[in-house]
Image: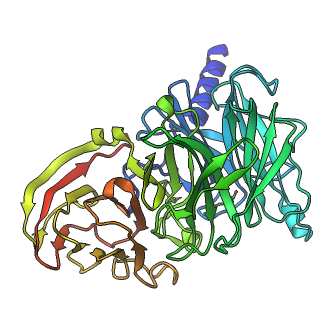
């Protein structure tokens, strides 16, 4: 009798904790093979990105009851290398104060909040739909929750919310970090069309410090998912980066991420130059960085979709993937500061050479390739123009064009585009300030991430061909060669 009860307990534990009852083999059409996707159902923003005790924690906006956005939870996955992810039970569920919107996580090494030394503390937005329905504006406030077992189980603070709203409609997405220079926590929050900064000694009482809204800034509506962190340039200068996200009005339509480079003294952020778009494709949003990564690394993760059509993309078991994790570095040239984005170095463990050629005369064509999990890289010593296309035997095609000072992607004939009028109305354009010398393209079933000049420029796109792309074509306008062409296959990470 006792043994049966024990057996039942073990069974229960296993199914809820390890998701042994998996209903998917991660092989559905369009399912990314080396990007993070939830096992099933709806996902949007990455949340609570943090490294702790040898593991990267990825929490994410999650609706476990549908493949469209709904009452938000925090899903949870962990990884030791940012490539292979283990899904864990849902971390945070809605409660009477509201749904659990985006936010961040910290490790409380000094027990400043009193929940325990090294408690993992999540700081998130409560979104109260009842208040929305009542027509009042103060529907969003900030709450905290703690975990003493590396994020497996969570307790919400009983005196939530810790930061109330004085009547702002959009008041959300706290990013909290320890600021050693002032010996306090800082919080940056998106509030209407600006961000606001607070400080605290215990994560429970917050002191307002300042607003950040640059003069003559672009009018891009509501701000969301801010981030704030310092970085050093390679000449040793320290600058602060403020990331802000905009659900609408990005350069190629809909959602997009931009960043400011400036200075921060624990109270006020002052931009040194105009903002820069982090990625000019339509499928890069809500991007924020991991906290506490060893060696001071800054690793960025975005949601690979766009609010214009995210709820309509043609997948059924799950919806949405994250981008590849990208390591940031800060550089400066005569036009100012900028970030480079490189795929994390461990990505190289997934790649296997398929084809390599030092000098390639164009037009270049290779057929019968598996372009569904593939990396294509080359250098451009002499060429300033090319058209690269991926296509299949059905005539579906996705093109990438480098033309003078522009990078243009086109998915208008890439297959299944009719699920939303906003998906492929036009080609997508990014203006470039430099001569392009290196090209990298990473393809994973239904996504392309393009990085130029070691990640100074980036463009991310989704596409949904009805058959995998298998033909690679590169034509340079003046027929000048491209160099060091490499085509690599990329292994699947799901076991
Ligand atoms: C950004 C966002 C956040 C919000 C969350 C809700 O995509 O709108 O501002 O917290 O999604 O799911």
Q: Position of residue 71 (x, y in %)?
A: 73, 57
Q: Position of residue 326 (x, y in %)?
A: 43, 48
The residue positioned 57% from the left and 64% from the top of the image is 274
The residue positioned 34% from the left and 77% from the top of the image is 414
User: Which of the two residues, 438 or 473, is positioned nearer the viewer here?
Assistant: 438
User: Which of the two residues, 292 or 478, is positioned nearer the viewer here?
Assistant: 478
Q: Is residue 465 above or below residue 232?
A: below
Write down which quadrant ligand 1 falls in.
bottom right
Name the colouring of the figure. Answer: rainbow
User: Which of the two residues, 129 or 422, is positioned nearer the viewer here?
Assistant: 422
Q: Is residue 3 above or below residue 353?
A: above
Is residue 63 visible from the viewing direction of this image?
A: no
Is residue 13 visible from the viewing direction of this image?
A: yes
Q: Residue extending furthest front?
A: 334
Q: Is residue 463 above or below residue 417?
A: above
Q: Position of residue 458 (x, y in %)?
A: 40, 61
Q: Is residue 65 above or below residue 59?
A: below
The residue positioned 33% from the left and 53% from the top of the image is 454
Q: Quadrant of the C terminus?
A: top left
Q: Position of residue 265 (x, y in %)?
A: 71, 42
Residue 483 falls in image quadrant: bottom left
Task: Please indicate whether residue 440 sits to the left or right of residue 135 in the image.
Answer: left
Task: Please indicate whether residue 376 sits to the left or right of residue 269 in the image.
Answer: left
The residue positioned 16% from the left and 47% from the top of the image is 353
Q: Quadrant of the N terminus?
A: top right
């Amino acid at each position: 009798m006792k043994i049966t009860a024990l057996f039942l307990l073990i069974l229960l534990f296993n199914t809820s904790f390890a998701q042994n009852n998996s209903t998917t083999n991660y092989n559905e059409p369009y399912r990314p093979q080396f990007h993070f996707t939830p096992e099933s159902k709806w996902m949007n923003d990455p949340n609570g990105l943090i490294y702790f005790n040898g593991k990267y924690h990825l929490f994410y906006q999650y609706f476990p009851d549908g493949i469209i956005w709904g009452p938000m939870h925090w899903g949870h996955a962990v990884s030791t290398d940012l490539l292979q992810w283990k899904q864990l039970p849902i971390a945070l569920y809605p409660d009477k104060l509201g749904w659990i919107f985006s936010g961040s996580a910290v490790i409380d090494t000094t027990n400043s909040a009193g929940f325990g030394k090294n408690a993992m503390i999540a700081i998130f937005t409560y979104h109260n739909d009842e208040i929305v329905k009542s027509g009042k504006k103060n529907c969003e406030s900030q709450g905290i929750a703690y975990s003493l077992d590396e994020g497996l189980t969570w307790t919400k603070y009983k005196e939530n919310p810790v930061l109330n709203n004085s009547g702002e409609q959009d008041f959300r997405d706290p990013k909290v970090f320890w600021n050693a220079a002032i010996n306090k926590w800082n919080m940056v929050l998106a509030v209407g069309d600006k961000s606001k900064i607070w400080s605290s000694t215990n994560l429970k009482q917050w002191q307002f410090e300042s607003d950040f809204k640059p003069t003559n800034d672009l009018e891009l509506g509501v701000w969301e998912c801010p981030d704030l962190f310092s970085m050093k340039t390679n000449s040793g200068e320290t600058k602060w980066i403020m990331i802000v996200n905009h659900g609408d009005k990005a350069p190629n339509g809909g959602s997009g991420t931009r960043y400011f480079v400036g200075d921060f003294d624990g109270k006020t952020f002052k931009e040194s130059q105009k903002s820069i778009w982090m990625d000019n494709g339509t499928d890069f949003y809500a991007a924020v960085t991991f906290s506490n990564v060893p060696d001071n690394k800054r690793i960025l993760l975005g949601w690979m979709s766009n609010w214009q059509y995210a709820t309509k993309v043609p997948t059924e078991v799950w919806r949405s993937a994250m981008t590849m994790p990208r390591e940031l570095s800060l550089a400066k040239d005569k036009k100012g500061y900028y970030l480079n984005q490189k795929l994390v170095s461990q990505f190289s463990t997934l790649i296997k050479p398929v084809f390599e050629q030092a000098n390639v005369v164009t037009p270049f064509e290779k057929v019968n390739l598996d372009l569904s999990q593939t990396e294509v890289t080359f250098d451009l010593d002499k060429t300033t123009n090319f058209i690269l296309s991926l296509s299949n035997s059905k005539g579906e095609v996705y093109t990438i064009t480098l033309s003078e000072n522009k990078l243009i992607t086109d998915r208008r004939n890439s297959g299944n585009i009719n699920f939303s009028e906003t998906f492929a109305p036009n080609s997508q354009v990014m203006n470039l300030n430099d001569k392009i010398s290196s090209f990298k393209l990473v393809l994973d079933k239904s996504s392309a991430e393009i990085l130029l000049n070691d990640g100074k420029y980036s463009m991310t796109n989704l596409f949904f061909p009805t058959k995998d792309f298998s033909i690679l074509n590169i034509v340079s306008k003046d027929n000048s060669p491209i160099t060091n062409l490499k085509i690599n296959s990329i292994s699947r990470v799901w076991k």
